[in-house]
């Protein structure tokens, strides 16, 4: 078979059905709802004192940075990464002692 004999069939890309559009819209709404719920929960972390935040591996400035992140960025991921980074640094320093 020569390359000139094979062609790309573009008829496969048809219109989206109503069900697939509804599924996409529902998924988008779930994502926005989850982001708002996470922002609300992280806003409540600001009420804790510094010792309670340190028990979770966080600092107050990390909570505030997560709250001021862009709207479509999940602030929970920012806090998870900050907490893991703090734990990794702690254990690296503990091994050196």
Image (cartoon, rainbow, N blue to C red):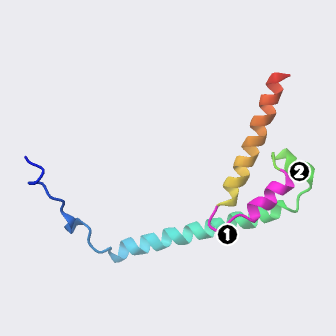
Residue at 76% over, 61% down: 42
**Image coordinates for residue 52, horizontal then vertical, percent:** 88, 50
Q: Is residue 60 magenta?
A: yes
Sort mark 1 into few (<14), some (14-19) or many (20+) by Cα contacts within 10 Å. some
Q: Quadrant of residue 64?
A: bottom right
Q: Going from the N terminus, do you reach mark 1 or mark 2 first?
A: 1
For disc 1, the marked residue is 36
Viewer-proximal residue among 38 and 72: 72
Q: Which residues are magenta?
A: 59-73
* CB-based contact (under 8 Å), mark 1 and mark 2: no
Residue at 70% over, 54% down: 78
Q: Is 14 situated left or right of 47 in this image? A: left
Q: Is 4 situated left or right of 87 in this image? A: left
**Image coordinates for residue 53, horizontal then vertical, percent:** 86, 51
For disc 2, the marked residue is 52
Q: Which mark is residue 53?
A: none
Viewer-proximal residue among 96 and 17: 96
Viewer-proximal residue among 6 and 14: 6
Q: Is 33 situated left or right of 88 in this image? A: left
**Image coordinates for residue 84, horizontal then vertical, percent:** 72, 42
Element type where label 1 sits in the image? helix
On screen, residue 34 above or below 88: below
**Image coordinates for residue 85, horizontal then vertical, percent:** 74, 42
Rounded to the nearest whole Å, what is the CA distance between mark 1 and mark 2? 23 Å
On screen, residue 51 above or below 31: above
Residue at 92% over, 49% down: 51
On screen, residue 69 above or below 2: below
């Amino acid at each position: 078979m020569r390359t000139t004999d094979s062609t790309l069939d573009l008829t496969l890309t048809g219109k989206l059905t109503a069900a697939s559009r509804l599924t996409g819209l529902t998924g988008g709404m779930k994502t926005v709802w989850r982001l708002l719920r996470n922002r609300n929960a992280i806003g409540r972390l600001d009420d804790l004192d510094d010792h309670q935040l340190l028990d979770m591996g966080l600092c107050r400035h990390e909570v505030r940075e997560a709250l001021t992140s862009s709207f479509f960025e999940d602030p929970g991921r920012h806090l998870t990464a900050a907490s893991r980074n703090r734990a990794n640094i702690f254990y690296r320093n503990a091994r050196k002692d």
